Image (cartoon, grey):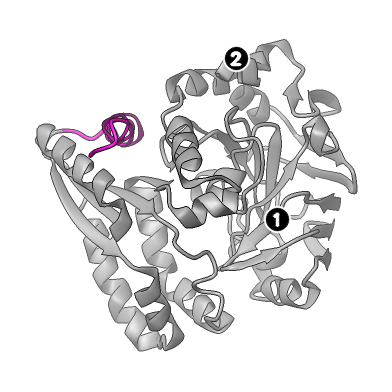
Amino acid sequence: MKDPRLPKLASVLLDHSLKLKKGERVLIKGHHTTKPLIAELIDQTYEKGAYPYIELLDDEIGRHLSMGYQKDQLETQAAWALKKYEDVDAVIAIIAEENDAEMAEVPSEKFQLRGEVFKPVQEFYINNRRWVLLNYPTPALAQKAGMSTKSFTDFLLKVCTADYEKMERAFEPLKKLMENTDRVRIIAPGTDLSFSIKDIPVVPCAGEANIPDGEIYTAPVKDSVNGTISFNTPCPYRGVMYKNVSLTFKDGKIIEAEADQKEKIERIFDTDEGARYTGEFALGVNPYILDPMGDILFDEKIGGSLHFTPGEAYEDADNGNRSSVHWDMVLIQRAEYGGGEIYFDDVLIRKDGIFVLEELNGLNPEKLK
């Protein structure tokens, strides 16, 4: 029997996230377990007079392919993918994780090779097409969250169908404040970090590109980051979970990295020159996502959190940093996680995860729920 909440989720994706119109073409990519949602998306797309196109994904097959990647093979595949994205107006990507470690045995150089070859394809559709990414409930994802499959399914569908229009309005004063801010200072246990965001664009995210959503991001001026930041959540990267990550910066560059797997994390930051600089700084505000589960699509939206990102900057909040790495790392500043403060130009704007300025009160949990 079809879950009665799927039609609402499909409507959020098509109407709020993509604003799909009659005659437009939408590519819907998803793992085979996402077929109930894909079917609903197909039906609603046709009802709008638009055209759905489907691509089914399989991580096990993807692992077999990844183990033997060659550059000329990937260049052919990338050319096909680019043509596909050129031919559509919008993209929905539905991830249904069955095993978070499926790709853990793939050599890092294969990931790096694919990242380099596919970078122009990724940049094209991210910057030239309307798109939205979401996770679909699976037993593996529920286990990661420490929930039963039923409880996690209820949780995910709740956060995915939040009132994103209210969130969008609440972001407006924070966006304006960040656009007029020069210096940022972050304080938390093991953390005292300062940087500038002067003249870097600010992008609020309220269900347009990610579901669930609830973040606002910009980027540090590339050489302005100084100090240390310690992350109190696990930091997943390509199937490997890093814990107790702490990064020390000087003039924008990571000069020291600590983690439970220090040698591995150092190799990631040696991937290319840009991997030791940062490409994103963001604040998370989703009132329904409170604890880390090791999945960045959720963790970066945690209410009362921030994330700081070594690697590639987004084109719409560009500080000029380029890398095949883009690694969101999350610090939760709510009191139960040790607390913390954020200052904009020496003015306290958030303490222990709660915005203290009156004009930002609409982003606090009791207002967003």
Residue 117 place in picture, x, y as percent: 42, 75
137 displayed left or right of 53: right
**Is residue 19 on the magenta stretch?**
yes
Q: How crowded is mark 2: few (under 14 residues within 10 Å), some or many (20 or more)?
A: few
Q: Element type at marker 1?
A: loop
- Along the line of sight, which residue is nearer the eye, 358 or 36? 36
Residue 80 place in picture, x, y as percent: 24, 71
Image vertical order of residue 230 relative to residue 351, above or below: below
Q: Element type at marker 2?
A: helix
**Disc 2: which residue:** 367
Residue in the picture at 75% in, 74% down? 266
Quadrant of the rendered image containing residue 164: top left
Q: Specify the segment rendered in magenta.
A: 1-21
143 displayed left or right of 246: left
- Along the line of sight, which residue is nearer the eye, 299 or 53? 299
**Is residue 37 on the magenta stretch?**
no
The quadrant the C terminus occupies is top right
Residue 334 place in picture, x, y as percent: 77, 32
Q: CA–CA distance between discs 1 and 2?
A: 28 Å
**Disc 1: which residue:** 234
User: Mark 1 vs mark 2: which is more N-terminal?
Assistant: 1
The quadrant the N terminus occupies is top left
